[in-house]
């Protein structure tokens, strides 16, 4: 029984925790992330605006029924007194109204169609945002793991140097200061390792919040990876594309179109309307006897607004101000998109240069560490030189790791700024990773 219970527990852990790559994490986030689920539900809700607006062009059918008690005094011509008549009447019928000309309804239909299209763009924005959030969380896990590996290397190297310092002190080769320095660096490395472990745990928890499942291991970026330069290779091309194709700009452009429709709909309030009206009804009336009247009518109904207390004119002024607001927001969105593209472009280009410089620095730091170790063994270097070289190498390893992930994120942000970030980009980036 104990073995069986243990097996069940292990299966439960395995089902909740698993190894993952970037593409798997992204697919899980698409299915489970609450923010994206809310955006998808909002899009589905906004799609109904198209159907709601179309209803204004279609026939409206209604059933009416009423029951009334009537009391009337009837005076006949030449009669000396009035005659009271009390009776009950019951009426029921059905009426169909088909708009023939209601310009505001046609404009409303265009508004509903545009609102549904805007909902699609908003969902694309949410998906793009999710892509960036998942990539950022995934890279945070990778960097936290690399940082932990770097400080673990430093801790192990400090342990070895501490042992060597103690052995040398016992032989009378070095002073007690060397022992104290080595111990201090070891204590610092141990503290850094604990902090790095905590940061890794937090990074994994953040990724799990997006994917809905905990991750025990992730595919990593190989050390020998070559990061590609952006294409096209000029910043102006990216800035121009951002001003035209950025999803935020596209949404603001649609909002400007919506403001034009709002203005047209407000102006339509001054126009006449024409409806086809058909009805069929029955009236039962009980007076001296019982009467039953059945009637059918078909006709057109013309309405011309003359005065609405200034309501329609106020709507037109409001629409004009909203149109100005939409124009200003579109201009601001274009500027913001270009700025985002410029920032991402600079981050990519400077990041690539920084990665190249740090790769050279890591090689130099490793060579310097090897040289200091050899010099310490032959007595031309002191303990602090080796300790400093170890710390320098560990620091360079962390900086190189961060520069790589920041550059990859900047590449994604650059594509997002021009509105081209897609699932294919996630697949291409995932292809760089190895288990």
Image (spheres, grey):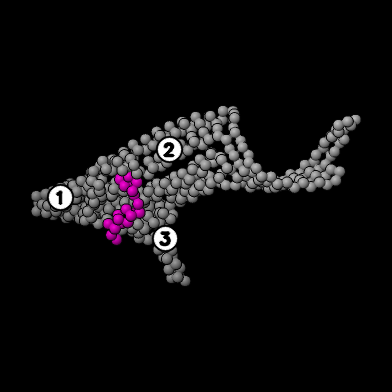
Name the foreground residue: 187 vs 124. Answer: 124
Q: Residue at x 43, y 46 (%)?
A: 122
Segment colored magenta: 414-435
Q: In x, y percent, where is residue 405?
A: 28, 50
Which is nearer the N-term, disc 2 or disc 1?
2
Rounded to the nearest angstrom, the CA distance separating label 2 from label 1 is 57 Å
Which is nearer the N-term, disc 2 or disc 3?
3
Disc assigned to residue 364: 1
Image-quadrant location for residue 418: top left
Foreground disc of the pair 2, 3 = 2
- Which residue is labeled 3 in the image? 16
Rounded to the nearest angstrom, the CA distance separating label 3 from label 1 is 43 Å
Residue 107 visible to the viewer: yes
Q: In x, y percent, where is residue 320?
A: 47, 31
Q: Residue at x 80, y 44 (%)?
A: 285
Location of residue 101 with respect to 143 vertically, above or below: above
Name the foreground residue: 189 vs 100. Answer: 100
In this rendering, would 275 be left or right of 425? Answer: right
Foreground disc of the pair 2, 1 = 2
Q: Residue at x 55, y 34 (%)?
A: 271
- Which residue is labeled 2 in the image? 256
* Magenta-span inclusion, residue 404: no
Name the foreground residue: 299 vs 414. Answer: 299
């Amino acid at each position: 029984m104990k073995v069986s219970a243990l097996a069940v527990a292990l299966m439960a852990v395995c089902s909740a925790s698993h190894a993952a790559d970037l593409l798997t994490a992204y697919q899980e986030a698409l299915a489970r992330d609450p923010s994206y689920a809310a955006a998808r539900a909002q899009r589905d809700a906004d799609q109904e605006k198209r159907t709601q607006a179309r209803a204004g062009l279609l026939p409206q059918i209604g059933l009416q029924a009423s029951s009334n008690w009537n009391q009337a005094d009837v005076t006949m011509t030449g009669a000396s007194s009035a005659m009271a008549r009390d009776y009950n009447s019951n009426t029921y019928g059905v009426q169909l109204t088909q708009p023939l000309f209601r310009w505001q309804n046609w404009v409303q239909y265009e508004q509903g169609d545009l609102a549904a299209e805007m909902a699609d763009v908003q969902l694309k924005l949410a998906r793009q945002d999710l892509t960036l959030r998942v990539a950022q969380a995934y890279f945070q896990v990778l960097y936290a793991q690399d940082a932990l590996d770097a400080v673990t290397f430093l801790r192990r190297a400090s342990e070895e140097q501490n042992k060597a310092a103690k052995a040398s002190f016992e032989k009378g080769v070095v002073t007690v200061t060397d022992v104290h320095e080595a111990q201090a660096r070891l204590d610092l490395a141990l503290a850094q390792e604990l902090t790095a472990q905590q940061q890794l745990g937090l990074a994994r928890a953040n990724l799990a919040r997006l994917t809905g499942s905990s991750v025990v291991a992730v595919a990593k970026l190989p050390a020998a990876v070559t990061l590609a330069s952006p294409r096209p290779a000029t910043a102006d091309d990216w800035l121009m594309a951002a001003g035209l194709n950025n999803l935020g700009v596209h949404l603001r452009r649609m909002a400007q179109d919506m403001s034009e429709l709002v203005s047209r709909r407000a102006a339509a309030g001054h126009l006449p309307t024409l409806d086809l009206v058909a009805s069929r009804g029955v009236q039962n009336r009980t007076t001296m006897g019982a009467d039953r009247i059945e009637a059918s009518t078909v006709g057109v109904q013309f309405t011309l607004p003359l005065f609405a207390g200034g309501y329609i004119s106020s709507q037109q002024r409001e629409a004009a101000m909203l149109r100005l607001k939409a124009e200003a927001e579109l201009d601001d969105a274009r500027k913001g998109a270009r700025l985002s593209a410029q920032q991402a472009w600079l981050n990519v280009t400077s990041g690539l240069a920084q990665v190249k410089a740090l790769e050279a620095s890591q090689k130099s730091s490793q060579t310097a560490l090897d040289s200091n170790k050899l010099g310490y063994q032959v007595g031309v270097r002191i303990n602090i030189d080796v300790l400093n070289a170890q710390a320098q190498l560990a620091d360079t390893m962390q900086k190189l790791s961060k520069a790589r992930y920041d550059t990859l994120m900047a590449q994604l942000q650059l594509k997002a700024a021009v509105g081209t970030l897609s699932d294919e980009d996630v697949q291409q980036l995932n292809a760089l990773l190895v288990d």
